[in-house]
Image (cartoon, grey):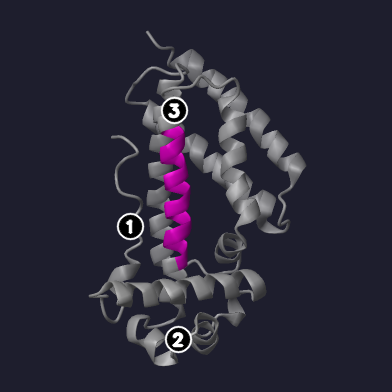
Amino acid sequence: MSMSAPVTDLGWQSRLRNAPQQPRSQAKIEQAVDAADRLLARSGANAVTTTRVAAEAGIAVGTIYRYFPDKEALFDALAARCLARFESLMDGLVQQSRTEKWADPVGMLFDVYTDLYRTDAGLRAIWFGGLLSENLREADRAHKRVMAQGLRDILISQDIAGDAPELATVCHAAMLASDAITQEAFRNNDSGDTALMAEAKTMLRSYVASINERFTPA
């Protein structure tokens, strides 16, 4: 499976009270989500009320209620954007890896990945602000498997590993470890704990070296 597959489906659109039928309706939804993102990044989860979202977006409160049944639906929409951003970025890296040879794949991938945490305050607020619904947790688990598939494609493209059934599990483990350390690095530091992230790179480079030994391309 290539990374051209659809991004992780959070199912948030199914939670809308009314499905948008026209581009104008879709634009209103985007305005509301944009406004919630700005409020979340600027002032935290408590600032995201339907009244404040409507004022920030410059639309009527009734328009918010027309589409979003509750704040959780807004947060799920924001989370869907975050996950899609990660997966789109990975898709681009997979394509790039097929035409370029990277001296330090681990360092490059880790830096690109962590930069989204560093620059996206809304992402940090969702993941660290107690806003993870069960729906979102399940989608995040599926998202990590999509990202692991991208990592697998890159390792094969970079001649670090040959294709093997076990490689999917290996890449999933690497993705889970990387994500856990990254989240810890940014949990209380908007810029990321540089020492912790440096150790993460060292650990992941060793793991990738072991992958190379276990799945040496023919």
Quarter in which the N terminus is drawn: top left
Which quadrant of the view contains residue 5?
A: top left
Label 2 sits on residue: 59
| First in sequence: mark 3 vs mark 1 | 1
Q: Is residue 90 magenta?
A: yes
Q: Where does the magenta region start and end? A: 78-94
Quarter in which the C terminus is drawn: top left
Q: Where residue 60 sits: x, y (%)?
A: 43, 90
Q: Secondary structure at mark 2?
A: loop
Q: Residue at x 49, y 66 (%)?
A: 132
Which of 134 and 35 lies nearest the eye of the viewer? 35
Q: Are marks 1 and 2 in contact (CB under 8 Å)?
A: no
> Are there few (<14), some (14-19), or many (20+) residues within 10 Å of tag 1?
some
| First in sequence: mark 3 vs mark 2 | 2
Which of 152 and 18 lies nearest the eye of the viewer? 18
Q: Residue at x 53, y 85 (%)?
A: 49
Furthest residue in direction top, as rendered:
218
Q: Residue at x 51, y 19 (%)?
A: 101
Q: Where residue 171 sits: x, y (%)?
A: 45, 32
Q: Secondary structure at mark 3?
A: helix
Which quadrant of the view contains residue 139?
A: bottom left
Q: Amino acid at mark 1?
A: Asp
Report, in whole angstroms, how far the alpha carbon at label 1 lies from the one at label 2: 27 Å
Q: Is residue 87 magenta?
A: yes
Q: Is residue 75 left or right of residue 138?
A: right
Label 3 sits on residue: 154
Label 1 sits on residue: 9
Q: Are marks 3 and 2 in contact (CB under 8 Å)?
A: no
